[in-house]
C-alpha cells in the first residue's frame, strides 16, 4: 500500500489541508498507527477517535481523516507537525469510496465474497486454504468484515493475488450494497440465514434479502440445498447453485477433528463440530467450480489452522478448553452443546454459555431453546451468564436439572467456574462477542 494524501482526498471526494504526504498504511485504532499511516478518526457509540489524534500523530501518522465537525481542531493539531488533514462528511464513507476506486483501477484478482448468519469466517478460511494449494490468495485478515473493515482488508491485500476471499457481515439494511460496491464479487457463498441481528431486520425474510444482495447479476452464487430461505434467494438472483454434501463416511473424532472421504481418499479435517461439514461443502463446490482437483481440496481442508474464538481447542494447563467466544447464534450454540455431549471424557465436562445478542423479539424463544437443548446435555456442570440466559435457566430449573449456575455478574461466574472446574476437565466457553467469554481464561489459569 502506497499512495499520497492528495490522491486519497481526490478519490474520496474530501478536502485536503496541508502539504501532500505519503501514506503507507491505514488504521482507525490509534494504538496500531505507525510511521506513514493514515489515521481515520471514527466517532463511535462509546469512544470518539478524534480524541486520539494526538496519539496517532505522536506514533508517526502522516495524515488524519476526520469529519467536518472536527476539521478545524484537527488542522490546529496536525498541520504544524507536517501531518496532512483530510476532511469529509463521513470518514467511513470516504474510506469506502477511495477503496472501491483504488481497487477497481488496479484489480487483477477474482473476487470471492462470503456472508451468512454464522460460519462466515470458517468458510472463508476453508476456501482460501484450498485455493492456496495452487494459487496466490489474499483473504480478509481476522474479522475485517464490516463496511469499515472491508475497505481496510482490500487496501492491504497482496497486489499480485489471483483470488481475493472476503468476508461480508451485515447488521443493518444497506450495508451489503455498500460492500459490494467495494468488491463486486465474481463468486459468492451464503452459508445460512439465522436470527442474528433480527432486532434490526425484523424478520428472517429481511435478513435473507439483505444478505442475498451479495449475489450481483454477474455473480455465481452457492448456497446449501437445505437452506430454508432458498426460494427468497432464488427470486433475487438467477445465478445461484445449490450445494449438497460431497463427503462420505463422515466420522467425528472428538477434539481431533472430522474424518471423511472425498472421492477415493480419506482424510481428517482439524475442526470441531459437525457444522463444519456444511461449511466445507460450500468451499468444495466453489473450489471445483474454479477447477481445483479433489487432491488439492483435501490438502487445503487438511491444513486448516484454528482461529481465535471459533471452536479452537486450547490446552490450559491440565484443562482442555473449547474456545468459541467470537459469536453465538442459536444454531451454533446447539451444535456446540451436541459436540460436547457426544465427547467421551474421563473427567468432568463443563458448558459455560453467555448471552446470544442482537436477536430482537426472537431472543426469549431462542434462549429457551438453548435451555431445552441443555436439559438433555451430557455434561457435569452448566454455567449461564447474562440477562438473556435467564430464560435458559428457567427451562432448566423447571425440568429439575440442578447442576446449573446462573448469574448476571461476571465475577460470580468466574468464582463459580473456579469452584467447579478441576484438573483434567473439558470446558466449553461460548457466547456472543459482547460477552467476552475469553476473560475466563484468567480463571482457568488458576485452576489448571
Image (cartoon, rainbow, N blue to C red):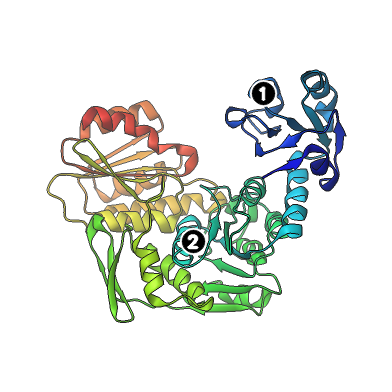
Label 2 environment density (alpha carbons within 10 Å; few <14, some 14–19, many ≥20): many
Residue 181 falls in which quadrant of the image?
Answer: bottom right
Write the residue at 74% across / 31% down: 64
Q: Where is residue 138 shown, x and y percent of the image?
A: 55, 56
Residue found farthest to the left: 346
The image shows a total of numbered marks equal to 2
Report the disc number at residue 52: 1
Residue 19 visible? yes
Q: Where is residue 207 shown, x and y percent of the image?
A: 61, 61
Q: Nearer the viewer, mark 2 or mark 1?
A: 2
Residue 416 visible? no
Question: Is 294 drawn above or below residue 55 in the view shown?
Answer: below
- Which residue is denoted by mark 2 in the rendering? 128
User: In the shown orientation, is residue 401 left or right of residue 310?
Assistant: left
Write the residue at 55% across / 66% down: 190
Helix or strand or loop: what does disc 1 sit on?
Answer: helix
The residue lying toward the viewer, choosing from 438 and 281, is: 281
Q: Where is residue 50 shown, x and y percent of the image?
A: 72, 26
Amino acid at each position: 500500500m502506497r499512495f499520497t494524501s492528495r490522491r486519497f482526498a481526490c478519490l474520496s471526494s474530501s478536502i485536503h489541508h496541508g502539504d501532500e504526504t505519503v501514506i503507507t498504511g491505514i488504521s482507525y485504532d490509534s494504538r496500531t498507527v505507525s510511521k506513514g499511516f493514515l489515521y481515520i478518526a471514527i466517532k463511535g457509540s462509546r469512544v470518539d477517535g478524534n480524541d486520539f489524534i494526538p496519539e496517532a500523530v505522536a506514533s508517526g501518522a502522516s495524515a488524519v481523516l476526520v469529519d467536518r465537525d472536527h476539521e478545524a481542531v484537527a488542522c490546529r493539531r496536525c498541520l504544524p507537525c507536517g501531518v496532512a488533514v483530510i476532511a469529509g462528511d463521513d470518514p467511513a464513507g470516504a474510506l469506502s469510496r477511495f477503496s472501491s476506486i483504488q481497487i477497481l483501477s488496479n484489480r487483477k484478482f477474482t473476487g470471492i465474497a462470503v456472508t451468512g448468519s454464522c460460519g462466515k469466517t470458517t468458510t472463508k478460511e476453508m476456501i482460501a486454504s484450498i485455493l492456496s494449494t495452487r494459487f496466490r490468495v489474499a483473504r480478509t485478515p481476522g474479522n475485517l468484515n464490516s463496511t469499515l473493515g472491508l475497505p481496510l482488508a482490500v487496501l492491504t491485500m497482496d497486489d499480485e493475488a489471483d483470488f481475493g476471499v472476503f468476508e461480508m457481515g451485515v447488521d443493518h439494511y444497506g450495508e451489503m450494497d455498500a460492500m459490494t460496491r467495494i468488491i463486486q464479487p465474481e463468486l459468492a457463498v451464503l452459508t445460512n440465514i439465522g436470527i442474528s441481528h433480527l432486532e434490526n431486520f425484523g424478520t428472517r425474510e429481511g435478513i435473507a434479502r439483505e444478505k442475498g444482495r451479495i449475489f450481483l447479476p454477474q455473480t455465481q452464487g452457492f448456497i446449501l440445498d437445505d437452506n430454508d430461505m432458498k426460494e427468497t434467494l432464488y427470486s433475487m438472483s438467477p445465478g445461484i447453485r445449490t450445494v449438497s454434501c460431497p463427503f462420505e463416511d463422515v466420522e467425528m473424532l472428538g477434539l481431533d477433528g472430522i474424518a471423511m472421504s472425498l472421492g477415493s481418499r480419506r482424510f481428517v479435517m482439524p475442526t470441531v463440530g459437525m457444522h463444519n461439514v456444511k461449511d466445507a461443502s460450500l468451499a468444495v463446490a466453489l473450489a471445483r467450480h474454479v477447477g481445483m482437483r479433489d487432491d488439492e481440496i483435501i490438502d487445503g481442508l487438511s491444513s486448516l489452522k484454528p482461529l481465535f474464538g471459533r471452536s479452537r481447542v486450547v490446552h490450559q494447563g491440565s484443562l482442555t478448553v473449547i474456545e468459541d467466544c467470537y459469536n453465538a447464534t442459536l444454531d451454533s450454540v446447539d451444535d456446540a452443546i451436541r459436540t460436547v455431549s457426544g465427547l467421551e471424557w474421563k473427567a468432568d465436562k463443563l458448558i459455560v454459555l453467555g448471552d446470544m445478542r442482537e436477536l430482537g423479539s426472537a431472543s426469549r424463544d431462542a434462549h429457551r431453546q438453548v435451555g431445552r437443548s441443555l436439559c438433555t446435555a451430557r455434561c457435569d456442570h452448566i454455567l449461564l451468564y447474562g440477562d438473556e440466559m435467564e430464560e435458559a435457566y428457567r427451562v432448566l430449573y423447571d425440568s429439575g436439572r440442578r447442576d446449573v449456575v446462573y448469574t448476571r455478574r461476571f465475577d460470580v461466574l468466574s468464582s463459580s467456574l473456579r469452584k467447579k472446574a478441576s484438573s483434567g476437565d473439558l470446558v466449553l466457553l461460548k457466547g456472543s462477542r459482547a460477552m467476552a467469554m475469553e476473560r475466563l481464561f484468567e480463571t482457568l489459569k488458576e485452576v489448571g
